[in-house]
Image (tube, grey):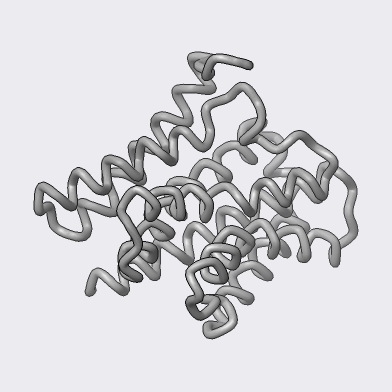
Amino acid sequence: MSISEIILVFDYVGTFAFAISGALSAARKHFDLFGGIFLGFVTAIGGGTLRDMMLNAPVAWLHNIMYFYIVLIAVILTFLFHNVIEKYSKTLFLFDTIGISIFTIIGLQKGLALDIHPILAVMMGVLTAVFGGIVRDMMCVDIPLIFRKEIYATACLVGGCFYLLLLWLGCNDFISVLVPSIIIFIVRTLSVVKNWSLPKF
């Protein structure tokens, strides 16, 4: 499997995870099925869509119907089994964290591929990771996670910087994608478990 195929699989996994997090939010707010599909779709593709528009690049999901199918399957599964899923109190957190871990690196890579400055590419990765969740929370009339005390976007920033470091060290593509994604997941998880937060204004 080539690195482009691996990245595409990662992208599908992130899309599935974010679609479930959107659908779970819809279930908690008692949306109907259409509302759940819409919220799942916006959560899953919102960050990538904004990124692609800002980079003047083709919007990925408009050129690959698989993204639509993945979101639809994720939402329907959540609609059918959300009572089972909700028994695990951290389910939304888990899928949201998987989503940001993957999407940060994918967004960063796309920025680098289009020759923007590495620092700005990291910011593009963070944007890809968090924007869908911001829209999800705003549509559910919740304070977006990025604005709460928990470390959220900062975890994406740390992972993005590690990606650039591994790239500079000449690590192979698979390691350069996998390790920063795991770092984001760990930092985000530990920040919740250990109650880490950034200083407040």
Instruction: Tell me if 182 is positioned left or right of 155 in this view.
Output: left
**Residue shown at the point (34%, 37%) measured from the top left:** 183
- The location of residue 149, given as percent across then percent down, is 62, 22
Quadrant of the snapshot with the C terminus: top right
Q: Is residue 183 above or below residue 104?
A: above
Q: Is residue 91 above or below residue 39?
A: above
Nearest the eye: 137 or 57: 57
* Residue 163 sits above or below residue 60 on the image: above
Q: Residue at x 53, y 85 (%)?
A: 63
Q: Nearer the viewer, residue 188 or 79?
A: 188
Does residue 61 appear left or right of residue 169 in this picture?
right
Q: Quadrant of residue 148?
A: top right
Relative side of 170 to 9, left or right: left
- Residue located farthest toward the left when viewing the structure as drawn: 170
Residue 143 in the image: x percent, y percent?
Answer: 76, 34
Figure quadrant of the N terminus: bottom left
In the picture shown, does residue 149 fall above or below 128? above
Give the residue drawn at x 72%, y 51%: 135
Query: x, y (%) of residue 91?
Result: 62, 39
Query: Residue 61, percent across and down?
Result: 57, 76
